[in-house]
Image (tube, rainbow, N blue to C red):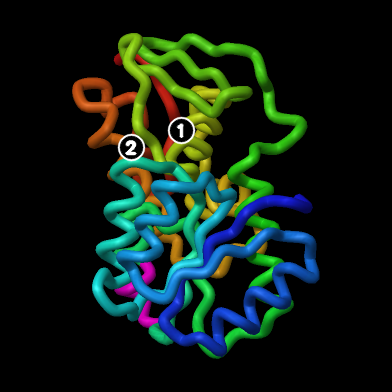
Amino acid sequence: MHGLKILVADDEEKMRQVIRIYLENEGYIVIEASNGQEALEKIKETKFALVLLDVMMPEIDGWTLCRKIRQEFCTPIIMITARGEEYDKLFGFELGVDDYITKPFSLREMIARIKAVLKRSNGDKNMNNNILKVGALEIKPRYRQIFLENKEMVLTPKEFELLNFLCQNPEIVYSREQLLNQVWGYDFLGDLRTVDTHVKQLREKLGSHKKYICTVWGTGYKFRVGD
């Protein structure tokens, strides 16, 4: 993980400094931004492994910035927020947020969440790297690409991981808890509806093939091609 670039976007200078020092001690390269506009410009100039993004920032707030990032990039995003309400988290996941850190937080927790998100976004070393063709989909796990009718789908890291997992395990019914464990990791502290939110987003992107992801009432979801 050493040498990976992380953008820390927060309008509180002391907060940025503390985070930067701690991350640099862990071997990361840290770039700072004091507002949303500055963060957006840096993201367009530099390829980051991960973005730590404060919700409440001047010029461009965290939600708007997250939406702008997701229009062009799949860079993992961890939101820093003082809010702990369930609605805010679900809203963030709809925008493509990978995880949350709620203020006040410990630096050890921050590092643990960063490492967990980076591990998931880089893909597990044991991931099946064989190209898989199923229905109108072609999955290239090694390159983290999924094509729908020969056109590459624009997916967030979590959307890719969820769809790839379901495609690799067709006809198997998974509960929401199992999908959280497999895709988000056992240490994820989010709501089960996070899975529903991502399934909804994937179905929208699958368009006429949205029925590939079947709801098994009272249980969870499975991937199936055909009637």
- Seen in the picture, residue 60 relative to 173 is either above or below; the reply is below
Q: Residues within 10 Å of mark 2 (few under 14, many from 20)?
A: many
Residue farthest along the left direction in this orientation = 208
Residue at 40% from the left image edge and 15% from the top image edge: 137
| Residue 106: image location, x then y, percent | 67, 84
Q: Residue at x 49, y 43 (%)?
A: 157
The residue tagged 2 is 202
- Where residue 140 sits in the image (x, y, percent)? 54, 18
Mark 1 closeness class: few <14, some 14–19, many ≥20 residues within 10 Å: many
Residue that numbered label 1 is attached to: 163
Amino acid type, callout 1:
Leu
**Secondary structure under the numbered disc 2 in the rendered image:** helix
Q: Amino acid at mark 2?
A: Leu
Give the structural element (helix, strand or loop) at label 1.
helix
Left of 188 or right of it: where is 13?
left
Q: From the image, give the main secondary structure of the stretch colored magenta.
A: helix
